[in-house]
Amino acid sequence: MLGNCSELNLEYVAVDQHGFSVMMDGALRETFGAGCEASQAQARALDMISARLATVLVSLGEIPAIRYMAKVGHRTSDVSRGVADRLDRIVTGLLRAKGAEAAKNSPTCDVLIVDRSVDVIAPVIHEWTYESMVHDLLDVKNGVYRYKITTNAGEQEKDAVLGDDDSLWTELRHAHIAEVLTTLADKTRAFAHIGPQGTGTRDLTTGQLKRAVEALPRVLEQRAKLSVHASIASEINVLLQSCALSEVGRLEQDVVYGDATSKDIAYLFNTLDEKGIRLPMVEKLRLLLCYVASHPQKIDAAEKSRWCKQTGLTASDVDILEKLELLGVKVLKDKASQSYFSSSTKASRPKVLERTGEGSDWDLYKFLPTIAGLIADIDSGALDGTEYPSIGSESGSNVAAAAASAAMLSPTKAKSVRTRTEASWATRTSSAESIGGESDTTDSSAAATASRHRRADSSASNRASKRATRRLIVFIVGGMTRGELREAHTLSKTLHREVLIGSTSLENPASFVEKLASLSTTVGRQYERVDLSGL
């Protein structure tokens, strides 16, 4: 029997267990495009982004403690601040409508709002994990891989859905491609030499044979999944070899960490040409984007002309590099940098995180997205309050009221697993402590002071404990990558805390380069306004 039915006005899709998208594919152009700053089109886009993000919080039954990125490279970030302010107003309005506005002082989750300028290397650098390579190199749309098989009836085209229902996909998707190839080879050999029950097929008893027949559908399904992923891995491996992507990836890593220059890039292109390896233009462009993003103020008219000659890229292709200026990256040389007495630009290079710990020993697996560092800093309380300020304040009191209000906010009345329902740590002081009582000695005064200090320490510890167990949500305006999505999975395990990451869209390198190229023209796409009245 249906006990309760509620209508939710949701404007997002779940990418997987730790990721979501608010489905605004043109958000990068509408928020960072040339001429859109402080425009009505940008304001409409920020309104829609914040409204759709609010529906995520409502469906989770969460009251957010909001922080945002204050700067984009060398200038302030109006985009991140704009979404944060609007989201705060929406949440305040919803709580006020429920008569629970005071619950804002006791948030149940942490939300960090940034934009794509926080890390412009992540969308273009090669990621060497299975999922990232599948969506980078293969024509996989909406998680569907299309392949061909040969049967007695001839060649047939089939579709395979790469999702959480595929156990082999969930096992391998975040693994390094070298590890995936080894694992698939081992599994293929195992299936070739063992029967359905994992033992030799000869001399089976009647009972063993029965169990083998009963397990046959499951074994056949496993074989089919293995066949699909072996086909995917084989196709990826062919592309890696034919385009020398391992050499490209190795140079990418050296470039972003300052160990290689544009001369090394030109040398690689020439070497590949001499070997007869035709590197796709988008691969050349991605490598140059990695260079200008990590080596500021390197482009002028003469440099662009030189790159066109050495890479085979057109002038319009090279012009795409300049679009990073709209994301706060200083790409173009200024008069000071061209001066004979100018200082080196090494000091102004962005900090690029380096992977450590598990998996860091794999080749080409050095790069770590900036988002991973921000999440770790939020969790530890080390995130800079000047660069990432808060909207509003957190008092740490009235937690029970906040939990009840979060449930009220959600039409489903479902409690978040991160919502705290216990009473506040705060206690009333005794009348003797408040007034001083009969004793006025130094000892009693010291004891009272020590007691207050213990309560203060305990309250701070409890607030930190509450923050460490509630959801942490990072939202990126302008698109997120699968490498960043992977970090949400990884950090949820290492921090023992649920980490979610969302964005206006989910990008692969080719789609990001295409959107970067579109920043020179603003297109005022109209989105249907979200109805928040029923939330």
Image (cartoon, rainbow, N blue to C red):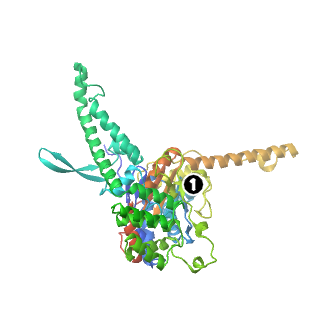
Q: Position of residue 236 (x, y in %)?
A: 33, 52
- As drawn, which residue projects farthest toward the left? 153
Task: State the SS at label 1.
Answer: helix
In the rendered image, the quadrant that contains the N terminus is top left
Q: Position of residue 78 (x, y in %)?
A: 52, 71
Q: Residue at x 60, y 64 (%)?
A: 387
> Which residue lies under the disc numbered 1?
378
Comparing 381 with 88, the one in front is: 381
Q: Position of residue 49 (x, y in %)?
A: 43, 66
In the rendered image, the quadrant that contains the C terminus is bottom left
Can the viewer see residue 146 in this picture? yes
Q: Amino acid at mark 1?
A: Ile
Q: Is residue 316 left or right of residue 397?
A: left
Q: Position of residue 379 (x, y in %)?
A: 57, 51
Can the viewer see residue 426 in this picture? no
Q: Quarter-wise, where is residue 123 in the image?
A: bottom left
Comparing 241 with 361, the one in front is: 241
Q: Quarter-wise, where is residue 182 in the image?
A: top left
- As drawn, which residue projects farthest toward the front? 274
Q: Quarter-wise, where is residue 227 in the image?
A: top left
Q: Residue at x 35, y 60 (%)?
A: 275
- Residue density around tag 1, few if under 14, some if 14–19, many if 20 or more, within 10 Å: some
Q: Is residue 440 left or right of residue 433?
A: right
268 lies above or below 301? above
Comparing 132 with 106, the one in front is: 132
